[in-house]
Image: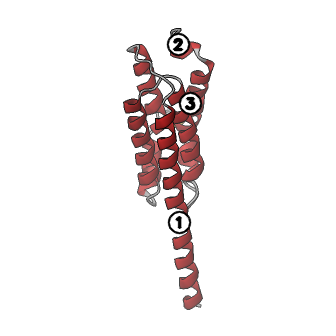
Amino acid sequence: MSTPASFDQDDRLRWVERISHLLDSQFRVPGTTWRFGLDPIMGLIPVVGGLPSLAVSGVLILTMLRHGASGNLVVRMVVNVLLDTIIGAIPVIGNVFDFAYKANDRNVRLLRRHYAEGKYQGSGKGLAAGVVLILLMLTGAVLWGAWVAGAALYHYLQHAF
């Protein structure tokens, strides 16, 4: 069995880092060191704004899993993304949280540390299936919540006028 390439030598892991940077810290507020990415901008779109970010974060985690992340590390990464998604869905508070909490950048740092410690594992296909299932269930819950909120709004508007 050959030793995996280092994090910086693996094109797929560099891709993960670039996408994470785009989502979490691509832009800088002029005159400050404060950075943000597309994730909090998409989060400003009511109800569905967090879904593209959740999907991309899931792909990033699966990519990291396929390239040496341990099961324990992936669980920590999923918790980061779920925390970002759940709190990010709260109006106003979630928008502020999205600008401050950078789940994807955190996950890349976790993976870099994992690589630096020389902890490489197999493909983790079983865990990957579990992660995908959890992300699909969360997406379903968000879509159901959006549907319920839309139905309640429709009902309210019907009776208000």
Distance in Å between CA atoms under marks 1 and 2? 41 Å
Q: Amino acid at mark 3?
A: Thr
Q: Where does the image place residue 136, in percent across and percent down from the top left?
A: 53, 51
Q: Where does the image place residue 11, in percent across and percent down from the top left?
A: 62, 19
Query: Where residue 4 is drawn, which disc sits there?
Result: 2
Q: Where does the image place residue 35, in percent across and percent down from the top left?
A: 50, 35
Residue 117 in the image: above or below residue 141: above
Residue at the image position 57 percent from the left and 48 percent from the top: 41
Residue 129 in the image: above or below residue 146: above
Is disc 1 surrounded by few (<14), some (14 to 19) or many (20+) residues within 10 Å?
few
- What residue is disc 1 on? 144
**Furthest residue in direction top, as rendered:** 2
Q: Nearer the viewer, residue 98 or 10?
A: 10
- Secondary structure under badge 3? helix
- What residue is disc 3 on? 63
**Among numbered discs 1 and 3, the one appearing first in the sequence:** 3
Q: Are marks 1 and 3 in contact (CB under 8 Å)?
A: no
- Secondary structure under badge 2? loop
Q: Residue 25, can we see it? A: no
Q: Amino acid at mark 2?
A: Pro
Q: Amino acid at mark 1?
A: Trp
Distance in Å between CA atoms under marks 1 and 3? 28 Å
Q: Where does the image place residue 24, in percent across and percent down from the top left?
A: 52, 37
Is disc 2 surrounded by few (<14), some (14 to 19) or many (20+) residues within 10 Å?
some
